[in-house]
Image (cartoon, helix red, strand yellow):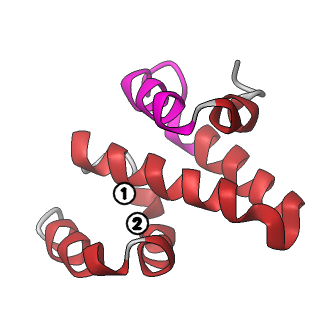
Amino acid sequence: MLDKIALLTALDPPRAVALLVEQREEVPVDRVVEQLSAAAAAAGTGGRGAREVLHMYLHHLFEVDAYAGEDHHGAQVALYAEFAPDSLMSFLHASQGQG
């Protein structure tokens, strides 16, 4: 499954994201981010779907475990700006309290 993350998320993004967050010990966060980022890059301008799934994944992960994806908070800011700008300030305030 570790090399099929982008395919899994393409089939049913909300369920796949929930599963990946739930199984974050078995499916490392860095691996998920790497594969979704690669899928978005490979798709070029059509990679919006993979980027949106990456946003969904990191958002859900942050809600469940704010520290699990902290290495990706920089990318997450850009994803919030692109897909959920109304939530960006809330994310910034919440993530500031971690450090």
Kind of residue sitting beneath label 1 = Glu
The residue that appears at 60% across and 49% down in the rendered structure is: 33
Residue 16 relative to residue 47: left or right: left
* Rendered location of residue 95, percent (x, y): 22, 67
Q: Nearer the viewer, residue 20 or 85?
A: 85
Kind of residue sitting beneath label 2 = His
* Rendered location of residue 82, percent (x, y): 51, 78
Q: Quadrant of residue 10?
A: top right
Contact, mark 1 vs mark 2 (Cβ under 8 Å) = yes
The residue that appears at 29% across and 50% down in the rendered structure is: 62
The answer to whether residue 27 shows anywhere in this view is yes
Q: Which residues are magenta?
A: 13-30
Residue 73 is labelled as 2
* Rendered location of residue 14, percent (x, y): 47, 36
The residue that appears at 70% across and 18% down in the rendered structure is: 1
Residue 78 relative to residue 70: left or right: right
Query: How far apart in space, not on screen, are marks 1 and 2 (Cα)?
Result: 5 Å
* Rendered location of residue 37, percent (x, y): 70, 56
Helix, strand or loop at mark 1: helix
Taking the magenta stretch, the answer to whether it contains residue 20 is yes
The answer to whether residue 65 shows anywhere in this view is no
Which residue carries the number 1 mark?
Answer: 70
Furthest toward the front, the residue is 12
The residue that appears at 15% across and 67% down in the rendered structure is: 94
Residue 3 relative to residue 48: left or right: right
